[in-house]
Amino acid sequence: MELLKEFRRLWQETHRRSGQSRRCGKKKSLMSKNTNMKLNALERQIGLEEAIKRYKRNISHNSDEDNAFERLAVIYRSRNQIEEEVRILKKAIAFYEHAVFAEHLESKLSMLNQFTRRLKSAQSLLSSQRNK
């Protein structure tokens, strides 16, 4: 239960600062480096498989809580599971397209752009792997 509270606290902290980090152009990701490191530590503490289940559960409930899409994409890339990364990035794009265009949440546009760029990168990597 304590770990879940820590995940929620980090998620709230990340979303409070996310607009600032993108506007100043200093961060590649919307998550701060410090928050990313804390989530990595929590993933190690509860186990990567449990973290993956939690992220998938959040996504299945139409939520990006705990930065589920981004964390799953990072995990899949680190495991060289590029097809899974592409799959989750496509889901992320659909999720954020809906938020931006159907719900008129322009604040989510930066996340949509981030996932779109990441998808292009993953698809390029997948294509080069298939051509070997």
Image: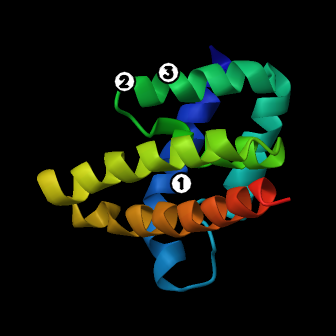
Q: Secondary structure at mark 2?
A: loop
Q: Amino acid at mark 1?
A: Thr
x and y percentages locating residue 106 in the rendered image = 23, 66
Where on the picture, by quarter, is residue 39? top right
In this view, which residue lies farthest toward the front? 131
Q: Amino acid at mark 3?
A: Arg
* Circle 3 residue: 57
Q: CA distance from mark 3 to mark 2?
A: 6 Å
- Look at the picture and state if 53 lies above or below 121: above
Q: Secondary structure at mark 1?
A: helix
* Label 3 environment density (alpha carbons within 10 Å; few <14, some 14–19, many ≥20): some
x and y percentages locating residue 112 in the rendered image = 39, 62
Report if the CB atoms under discs 1 and 2 are less than 8 Å apart.
Answer: no
* Circle 2 residue: 61
- Give me the residue at 63% from left, 32% from top: 6
- Give me the residue at 61% from left, 66% from top: 29
* Label 2 environment density (alpha carbons within 10 Å; few <14, some 14–19, many ≥20): few
